[in-house]
Image (cartoon, rainbow, N blue to C red):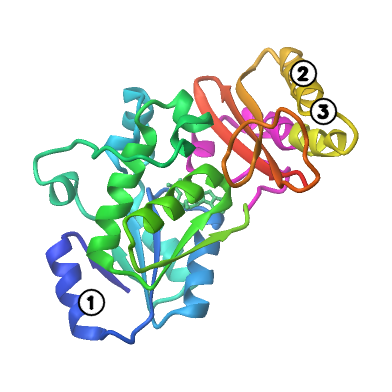
Amino acid sequence: MLLFNTQNELTAHLNSVSNESTAIGFVPTMGALHKGHLSLLEESLKNNQINVISIFVNPTQFNNAEDLAKYPKTLVEDMAKIKTVSDDIIVFAPSVDDIYEGNTVSKHFDFDGLENQMEGKFRLGHFNGVATIVKRLFEIVKPTNAYFGEKDFQQVQIVKKLVEKLKIKVNVTSCPIYRESNGLAMSSRNERLTNKEREKAAIIYKTILEAKKRFVSKSAKEVTEFVQREFIKQPDFELEYFQIAEEVTLLPCIRKSPHKKYRAFIAVFVNKIRLIDTISLN
Ligand code: AMP
């Protein structure tokens, strides 16, 4: 396993071991790795000759200073987890300065409105930060294939739009959500929950599963009201949003169309820790 801390070192290495026809797989992460991250890496290993994982807590995508400050940083443990998947993986863990070169700000992007829904609405500037770092990492790694998790479904759509608009030569693959045994979507932020909170947080997946069942016969509005009522009953949980949206445009579902695919999106605070989840509805 190789670890590079600067883009110059990584680029020099990639240039020495690859040519135009080498398939490079890339998994961008913010570290504090769990099995969800490792499942993306496994997918990458199946289809590429060279595999790179980045570990970089990107400051420009955080709209909340406390969330950024408390984001777990566990490089040594992360390296050990990566090793359990394969020894033949390149880890890129640069510093903020190496990536942003003294100018830690986002560029501004237009994603045809995708950026204004849900995560974009509640985390102002988040997707400009995400797109800034993903574009930068794509320029450095020059991957053939990049792997992202469906847990951040809106992010996947944003990255696909970024690639399309900027004509970046990379295939973006989205991978299924990896869950804990109680159904809670794996997340680095779960580490900050107490055991009790982690157990109770199973309510998030349980509720969206029930929402999926109800969406067969009920309207988006009725399902949304059901979810809101469920969370009012839970004093330890604060529902930030529950939204049923069309998968491609991410616009809210006002009236169901049999020709469209819908997805439910949820964001919940548990003791100031923000958890998200999503489920396909049809
Ligand atoms: P993060 O480190 O949270 O920025 O996540 C890095 C990548 O891992 C993103 O593409 C996420 O969508 C993906 N990811 C995070 N959690 C999961 C999960 N539970 N299952 C599958 N992929 C995930």
Q: In the current view of this chain or complex, which residue is farthest to the right? A: 217
Establish if 239 lies above or below 43: above
Please name the residue shown 46% across and 30% down the image: 116
Percent x, y for residue 57? Answer: 32, 44
In the image, 4: left or right of 254?
left
Q: Position of residue 251 (x, y in %)?
A: 59, 34
The crowding category of the residue bearing disc 2, from other C-alpha atoms within 10 Å (few below 14, some 14 to 19, many at least 20), is: few
For label 2, the residue is 225
Left or right of 218? Residue 104 is: left
Image position, residue 63 (x, y; %): 35, 26
State the CA–CA distance, disc 3 to disc 1: 51 Å
Tell me the residue at 18%/84% (across/down): 16
Q: For the magenta stretch, what is the residue range?
A: 178-205
Residue 171 point in image, percent of width and height: 44, 68
Q: Amino acid at mark 3?
A: Ser
Q: CA distance from mark 1 to mark 2?
A: 52 Å
Crowd class of label 3 (few under 14; some 14 to 19; many from 20; radius 10 Å): some
Residue 165 higher or lower than 62, as above or below: below
First of labels 3, 1 by sequence position: 1
Kindly identify the amino acid type of the residue bearing the numbered disc 1: Leu
Q: Which numbered circle lies on residue 14?
A: 1
Along the polypeptide, which appears first: circle 2 or circle 3?
Answer: 3
The label shown at residue 219 is 3
What residue appears at the point 71 percent right and 47 percent down from the top-left corner?
261
Q: Nearer the viewer, mark 2 or mark 3?
A: 3
Q: Nearer the viewer, mark 1 or mark 2?
A: 2
Secondary element type, mark 2: helix
Kind of residue at badge 2: Glu
